[in-house]
Amino acid sequence: MILITGASSGIGKACAEAFAREKKNLFLVARRRERLEELASDLRSRHGIEVVAAVLDVSDEKQVMELAQSHAREVEQVDVLINNAGLARGMDPLHQGTSADWNEMIDTNIKGLLWFTKLVLPIFTKRNSGHVVMMGSVAARWMYTKGNVYSATKAAVHALAESLRLDLLGTKIRVTTIAPGMVETEFSEVRFKGDASRAKTVYEGMQPLSAADIADAVLWATNRPAHVNIQEIVMYPVDQASTSQVSRKPR
């Protein structure tokens, strides 16, 4: 069973669709009930698989622990955890940022990942198999102007993945980080708090990656032979050479 956080849209949804096509049973977690349940129903009917949907906020440790109890059977069946839930809030110089935005990014991008990783690792270690996929970012290592706290949270994700591989050395558990560049999802609209017109300018004049592109990479990494661990995949669109260098064609 594939456990995906942040599964109701964007990369998480694309991962759910990719694994459903492979006839993998799914355990989908997200905050938006209507979207999540609609996706779960659609995947069940189209692919004939088991899809469990759980509505919760990954940043709330209590909710995650309650999930472990209410869905104990499904948690025991998890083979792959895709720690996808994450977000950016605001794009300001550090001294103009808000603590509310910082807390939301830290609680979701770092703590949420920790709660779910801790949830499945006892099962993985007992079974001596399993795969943890961390959704990182190129911003984890290559900073960009006004990316400050978001970049810091993704640097933490990168460090946690590296540390986890050391902690699990000697087991058959695999850990993979996917580090995308620009991907056109709701990411920028969330960052700019619903300002769709501003979000649209992020991708103007260039072709970004799609959520499906990232899902393909996740699927490929998890489908390698059991003795192969893909430690990290860095993905940029051709129109992006670094976090700050993007080729845009005038309209």
Image: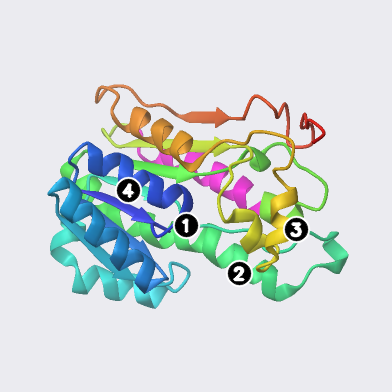
Distance, label 2 to label 1, CA atoms, is 12 Å
Which disc, if any, is residue 198?
Answer: 3
Per the image, label 4 sits on a secondary structure element best described as helix
Left or right relative to 214: residue 186: right
Distance, label 3 to label 4, CA atoms, is 28 Å
Which sits earlier in the primary sequence, circle 3 or circle 1? 1
Q: Which residue is mark 2?
A: 104
Q: Which residue is mark 4?
A: 16
Residue visible at 37% across and 29% down in the picture: 221
Crowd rating for badge 4 (residues with CA inside 10 Å; few <14, some 14–19, many 20+): many
Q: Amino acid at mark 3?
A: Arg
Which sits earlier in the primary sequence, circle 2 or circle 4? 4
Q: Amino acid at mark 1?
A: Ala
Distance, label 3 to label 1, CA atoms, is 23 Å
Q: Nearer the viewer, mark 3 or mark 4?
A: 3
Q: Amino acid at mark 2?
A: Glu
